[in-house]
Amino acid sequence: MTEPERPGTPVEEELSGRLLLASPALSDPSFAGSVVLVLDADESGALGVVVNRPTDIEVASVLPAWASAVGEPATVFRGGPVAPENALALGLLATVPSPEDPEPPGWRGVRAGLGLVDLDVAPELLLGSLAALRVFAGYAGWGPGQLEGELALDAWIVIDALPGDPFSPHPEQLWRSVLRRQPGRTSLLSTWVADPTLN
């Protein structure tokens, strides 16, 4: 189910900026039905954020200075089980910078205009550059070799992200909609339901 690794390329270099969709075989309640955007992956492990689990907490109530950049639903998302007390923000630049351009202050690029926003910088330094912003409580993390082991067990489906995926206004539909646009048999998974009598 996962895409094959390119010969001679470490799997971690292939994952940053891509989506991990929980396969129907993944029963861990922390991740069942989840869509994870991988933010960083190397030999020491990987981390990402679950992009399809909004909470009821309004961003305006906890980070009012950033609220104007947040799209619908304008809530904090449950980014994962690690450090849920910490906030992490993901942004999309209005214009994709060229490799020679300096990064805006408070910005760490992940891939093609997508990056992490430092919520401690003055918002006015970045707000004019952002097309989208999403705030997460916590993140998903894997130790060395852990994610590769899960991929080998077909626990995750690796899919290229579209720029708008992490900022979908309908996060509850994201798992199915991402699968539906895939070619071949992968798209059939979008019809999967947990109750086998409904399949």
Image: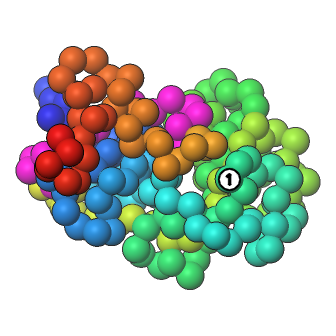
Q: What amino acid does circle 1 point to? A: Pro
Residue 195, image x and y in percent? Answer: 20, 54
Q: Residue at 21% of width from left, 17% of height from top? A: 184
Q: Which residue is mark 1?
A: 73
Q: Residue at 43% of width from left, 33% of height from top? A: 177
Q: Which residue extends farthest front?
A: 197
Q: Which residue extends farthest top?
A: 183
The quadrant holding residue 65 is: bottom right
Q: Residue 66, relative to residue 98: is it above or below?
A: below
Q: Quadrant of the N terminus?
A: top left
Whether residue 153 appears in magenta in the rendering, the answer is yes
Q: In this rendered view, identify the residue nearer to me: 44 or 32.
A: 32
The quadrant holding residue 76 is: bottom right
Q: Residue 35, relative to residue 145: is it above or below?
A: above
- Give the magenta-colored segment's residue range: 150-166
User: Regarding mark 1 in the picture, which secondary structure is present there?
Assistant: loop
Residue 46, image x and y in percent? Answer: 34, 57
Residue 136, image x and y in percent? Answer: 58, 64
